[in-house]
Amino acid sequence: MDRREDVVLSKAIKAQATRYTAPPALLDRLVVALNQVDSVSPRRRSNASSWQQWLGMGGAFAFGVVASLTVTLFYAAPGLDDRLAQEVISGHVRSLMVAHLADVTSSDQHTVKPWFSGKLDFSPPVHDLAAEGFPLVGGRLDYIDQRPVAALVYRRQQHTINVFVWPSGAVSTSAAKSLSRQGFNVEEWNDSGMQFWAVSDVGASDLQTFVELLRNAQSAPQLDPPK
């Protein structure tokens, strides 16, 4: 690696690497390693150049260890999307394991949506897609990204689809991003100031179709509930 490439890599690590404080045990091991390297030359007191050579090697060794650790942590540390994907998958699996899919069970969006009133500091959009093959089952409260969120439950034949919703803080609309983790398909997008995460073991194409239908329903004019 030439000097220019070394400078580019150094800047990238400084700008993007997740920084962790080295544990005391690691620092102790580095000190011991440097002392061992320094003690290799018994004539270091009488030969200054030899001492400087070994010291330089010890410094290079320590730098190599720290650089390797930094790069390893940079690549190993999960990004925001990966962390949230894991949380929504865990929430999906948890709802299936404890048989707690819904706090309010209804296919009527005008029953499910008002149920969240007073339980959350936002109103989640709720749509029934039974006519398109994705009936609404109900909704419940869940906890994602260190806050209470709405979980809307849909069916696709024998498959369950959980849609987690909470305010995104962004007014822009983003295209859906597809992820696949642990045998589950995940779709994530922002729309109308809300963040959406849909997760299911349904096929990727079916989940993408569902998301498209849901987004179309969200953008369509909303009718008042029947009185």
Image (tube, grey):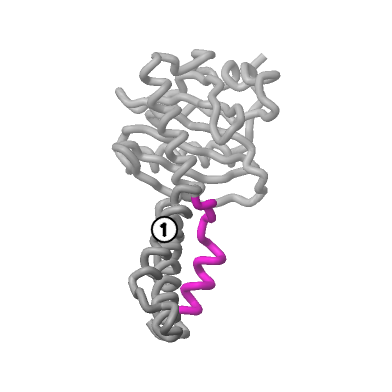
Q: Between residue 166 and residue 131, name the one nearer to us.
A: 166
Query: Vertical placement of 214 versus 43: above or below?
Result: above
Q: Between residue 141 and residue 217, name the one nearer to us.
A: 141
Q: How many marks?
A: 1
Q: Residue at x 51, y 60 (%)?
A: 17
Query: Vertical placement of 123 versus 20: above or below?
Result: above
Q: Between residue 223 and residue 188, name the one nearer to us.
A: 188
- Residue 194: percent from the left, percent from the top? 61, 40
Q: Between residue 144 and residue 151, name the one nearer to us.
A: 144
In the image, the segment drawn in magenta is: 6-22
Residue 219 quadrant? top right
- The overriding secondary structure of the stretch rendered in magenta is helix
On whether residue 21 falls in the magenta region, the answer is yes
On whether residue 85 falls in the magenta region, the answer is no
Residues packed near mark 1 inside 10 Å, few (<14), some (14 to 19) or many (20 plus): few
Q: At label 1, which amino acid type do we have? A: Val
Q: Residue at x 60, y 27 (%)?
A: 148
- Residue 180: percent from the left, percent from the top? 34, 44
Q: Residue at x 57, y 19 (%)?
A: 112
- Residue 48: percent from the left, percent from the top? 45, 84
Q: Is residue 212 visible?
A: no
Residue bearing the label numbered 1: 32
Quarter of the image with the N terminus is bottom left
- The answer to whether residue 109 is left or right of residue 130 is right
Query: Vertical placement of 224 versus 213: above or below?
Result: above
Quarter of the image with the C terminus is top right
- Residue 95: percent from the left, percent from the top? 42, 21
